[in-house]
Image (tube, rainbow, N blue to C red):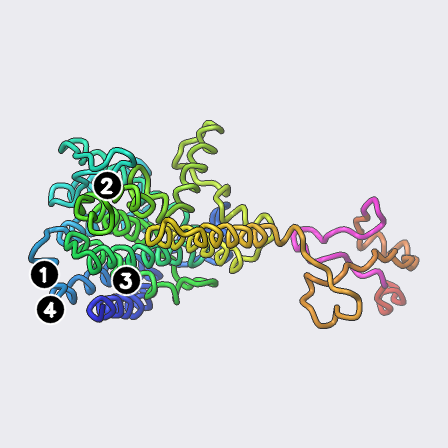
Amino acid sequence: MREYLLTLCITAAVTYLLTGPVRKFAIVAGAMPEIRARDVHREPTPRLGGIAMFFGLCAGLLVADHLTNLSEVFDKSNEPRALLSGAALIWLIGVLDDKFEIDALIKLGGQMIAAGVMVMQGLTILWLPIPSVGNVALTQWQGTLLTVALVVITINAVNFVDGLDGLAAGMVCIASAAFFLYAYRVWVSYGIEAAAPATLFSAILMGMCLGFLPHNMHPARIFMGDSGSMLIGLVLAAGAISITGQVDPDALKLFAGSEREAVQQTVPVYIPLLLPLTIIAIPAADLILAIVRRTWRGQSPFAADRGHLHHRLLEIGHSHSRAVLIMYFWSALIAFGALAYSVNSASMWIVLGVVFLSAIGLILLLLPRFTPRAPKWAQAFVPPRYRRRRAAVEPAPVAPVLEEEQERTPVAVSVSGVSGVNGATAIGARSRFLDRRKAGSSR
């Protein structure tokens, strides 16, 4: 555990220290796109934060390779090298997209190639644990197609959820923390060494996100861009593929009577049976809803819009920070709920706890719809949003205006009798009172 914590801290420190210089480089390189209609930030913000995250990944792998116990992962498995190769390719494509905004189909092809590179080096799904069936071996083509599909789905799910400051990095950090605890338990508690690469990938992924978050929290000073979102999505998918496709459920007979029972007990945390729902349930749901929404409108599935879950939270009335925290809450509830269920699936307290926390989450979601109002005596001590609205005051009578002054300064009057907005300035209505010097002059 000490070596994992050291790797995590080194990765976080390198990512954090490099993000500042990367931000200056992004500004000089012109990686600051104009604000689009679907964006929620108000000022142009540099991208390319994935550069610092990639070097943090490299630093974490380099440190782990020189540690006593973690170096065995590199000696007995080729998966860390496969991850680095695929990450370098997807990171390069993301950097080009952050700078030049390449076509969506080109990015999709690059994602498939990066997944294929990892498959060629041994990071692939060999078998699947199926409920009520047991361990099902896959052919080479089946494993390759399933691996590529899982990588592409996970990358785009993380990329789609990257719409608010600190949202994608925080949600992936929460998911990787739960995944780390599960993989570490499988490796250490049950002596399954095939789970060691997934444990290492999760620790490094946590370090990448934790090192970048201080620069990315609202108001963000830099965005990770596609170079960062696609990178962390690929690392998350690599960990899920490693532990699902390489760990033989037959070895889990240590805590179950048969292989079939072992599979049934570990289903909630064997992430990619079909989709990585338990670890990125919120991004995956957002991805599916976005595809359905866009295709229903006759648009491309890759067309950008403002219909994501985080956009809907803002439309309900949540602030930027509270919307991000609500997404964090639901991600942690799903990820750690599945983790707790894997430890003791027969405990009713876990189910009741998840149900209770889900009810709290629903209340938090609907909080702007039911904003309480403080009584009159307490309105001076609460924020303005909790104060009662005052009754509308009728406008005061308008003073008579001289005919000569009215010709010089026309005033637009609305139907309700209130002055309109002054042209393009949109500051407010003109004053109802005349300037005494102008009224008394002969001009």
Q: Which residue is mark 2?
A: 110
* Kind of residue at disc 4: Thr
Distance between the Cα atoms at labels 3 and 4? 26 Å
The residue segment tinted magenta is: 414-433
Q: Nearer the viewer, mark 1 or mark 3?
A: 1
Q: Position of residue 38 (x, y in %)?
A: 49, 46
Q: Main secondary structure of the magenta part?
A: loop
Number of residue marks: 4
Which is nearer the eye, 107 or 80?
Answer: 80
Q: Which residue is mark 4?
A: 68
Q: Nearer the viewer, mark 2 or mark 1?
A: 1
In the displayed structure, 149 sits above or below 324; it is above
* Kind of residue at disc 3: Ala
Position of 114 compared to 48: left or right? Answer: left
Q: Are marks 1 and 3 in contact (CB under 8 Å)?
A: no
Which is nearer the eye, 371 or 33?
Answer: 371
Q: Which residue is mark 3?
A: 52
